[in-house]
Image (spheres, grey):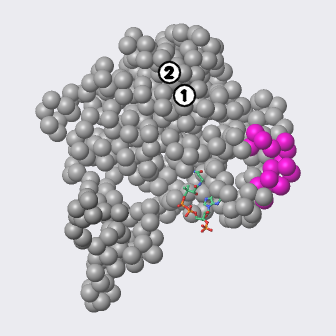
């Protein structure tokens, strides 16, 4: 039951509950973590609505992953419609022209140590970009350059990640202009120093589509709260990156990888998983705050992980992942979320584990930005209330008399 429905309910009114009692009751009914509470409106996506697992602007994510490139989906999310061929070509050409990093940003990236967390790197990169190429916020509540800022971030986030990674790890200053037309291929090209094959480019497209948008998840909500203060878009996205960094949100694909690569085969995986469950450990890449029976993104990325596994002749990681899935469902009725099979898929493409979550950023930027624009278009500052659990009102004891 939603909190507002409860507060309005006959039971609450008849019993003349105090606000604190109502909040306590709501918490019992599932208020913790704001689960199940509607916090605003969106036309961008539906998550877990019956009959359609995940839709972006009315399109099933499966349909989009099968038939579109990531740039088409980015266009859909940011501009409200799927592009026709001419619009897509023009959009991709425009983004290609925005991939170079300003020299000052490169200087900053070169100062960041090799052992930095890559999510901190992209957070700093985004924030620095906001200093160098500020959004026009000169007239309060009017944002004439927001779309240009988003295009720029979409085009150059992969460059920020790869520039820092290759410089700090290999001592190489990469060329951010690879000539690849898609963001996914461009990223792999900069990372590995060579053009990716068609399979890898396709998987990157699918992966970026699957991660692009997910309603009021924690990082998106962060972006919306920031936008509701009429702050600039780089602040909104920087805050969202910080929120995505946590292991309960975007960091789960990396944690899943760390786990599965320790298992020597499927039986070993089962034995270890049973032990973890017995110890009541949380297993990353499983469960979801909204989906209750499956994550629609899982079947899609799982299929591609299997293809990649065959492509590289893997006989361990994919069977291990499948066994983990079986054990979790059998023992706990917990299912893989989008992150679990992303781990092996990225591994098979030679992507270092520490870059998994920054790829999520390259994609989810579209959803965050879509929500920022939506919030700005119909804004009221987001300011919920808290259920106070502290001391009753009391006077200040003079400092000399305190313990
Ligand atoms: C996604 C997640 C944060 C959702 O959290 P939530 O809606 O608050 O769900 P809960 O944590 O209340 O889980 C309900 C129960 O399932 C268990 N559970 C949920 N996810 C679990 C997991 N991944 N491994 C083991 N047990 C899990 C919880 O311990 C809890 O058990 P309990 O009732 O005995 O305490 C949670 O499932 C999780 O931490 N998953 C792992 C991290 C992850 O993959 N995040 C990416 C999300 S896309």
9 horizontally vs 270: left or right: left
Q: Are marks 2 and 1 in contact (CB under 8 Å)?
A: yes
Magenta stretch holds residue 54: no
Range shown magenta: 260-274
8 horizontally vs 181: left or right: left
Q: Residues within 10 Å of mark 2 (few under 14, many from 20)?
A: some
Q: Which mark is residue 116?
A: 1
Q: Position of residue 176 (x, y in %)?
A: 49, 13
Q: Residues within 10 Å of mark 1 (few under 14, many from 20)?
A: few
Quadrant the N terminus occupies: bottom left
Q: Which residue is denoted by mark 2 in the rendering?
A: 112
Report the predominant secondary structure element of the magenta stretch: helix
Q: Residue at x 25, y 38 (%)?
A: 231
Asked if 387 appears above or below 368 in the picture, the reply is below
Q: Position of residue 130 (x, y in %)?
A: 32, 26
Magenta stretch holds residue 261: yes
Q: Residue at x 52, y 56 (%)?
A: 53
Q: Tell which quarter ligand 1 is in.
A: bottom right
236 horizontally vs 335: left or right: left
Q: Residue at x 50, y 40 (%)?
A: 245
345 or 254: which is nearer to us? Answer: 254
Asked if 12 appears above or below 304 in the picture, the reply is below
């Amino acid at each position: 039951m939603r909190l507002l429905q409860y507060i309005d309910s006959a039971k609450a009114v008849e019993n003349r509950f105090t606000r604190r009692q109502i909040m306590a009751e709501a918490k019992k009914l599932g208020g913790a973590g704001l689960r199940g509470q509607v916090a605003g409106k969106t036309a961008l996506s539906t998550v877990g609505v019956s009959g359609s697992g995940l839709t972006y602007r009315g399109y099933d994510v499966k349909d989009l992953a099968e038939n579109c490139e990531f740039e088409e989906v980015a266009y859909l999310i940011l501009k409200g419609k799927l592009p026709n061929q001419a619009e897509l070509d023009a959009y991709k050409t425009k983004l290609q022209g925005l991939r170079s990093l300003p020299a000052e940003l490169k200087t900053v990236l070169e100062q960041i140590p090799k052992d930095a967390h890559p999510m901190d790197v992209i957070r700093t990169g985004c924030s620095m970009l906001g200093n160098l190429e500020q959004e026009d916020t000169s007239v309060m509540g009017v944002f004439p350059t927001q779309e240009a800022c988003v295009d720029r971030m979409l085009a150059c986030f992969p460059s920020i990640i790869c520039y820092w990674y290759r410089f700090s790890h290999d001592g190489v200053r990469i060329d951010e202009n690879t000539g690849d037309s898609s963001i996914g291929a461009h990223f792999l090209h900069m990372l590995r120093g060579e053009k990716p094959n068609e399979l890898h480019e396709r998987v990157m497209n699918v992966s970026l589509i699957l991660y692009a948008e997910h309603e009021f998840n924690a990082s998106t909500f962060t972006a919306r709260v920031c936008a509701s203060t009429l702050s600039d878009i780089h602040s909104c996205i920087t805050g969202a990156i910080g929120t995505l960094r946590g292991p309960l949100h975007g960091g789960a694909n990396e944690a899943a990888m760390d786990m599965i690569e320790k298992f020597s085969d499927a039986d070993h995986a089962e034995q270890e998983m049973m032990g973890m469950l017995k110890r009541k450990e949380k297993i990353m890449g499983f469960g979801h705050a909204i989906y209750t029976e499956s994550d629609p993104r899982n079947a899609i990325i799982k299929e591609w992980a299997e293809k990649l596994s065959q492509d590289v002749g893997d006989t361990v990681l994919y069977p291990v992942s499948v066994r983990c899935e079986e054990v979790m469902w059998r023992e706990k009725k917990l299912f893989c979320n989008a992150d679990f099979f992303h781990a092996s898929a990225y591994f098979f493409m030679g992507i270092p584990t520490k870059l998994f979550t920054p790829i999520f950023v390259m994609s989810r930027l579209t959803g965050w930005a879509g929500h920022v624009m939506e919030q700005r278009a119909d804004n009221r500052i987001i300011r919920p209330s808290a259920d106070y659990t502290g001391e009753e009102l009391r006077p200040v004891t003079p400092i000399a008399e305190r313990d």
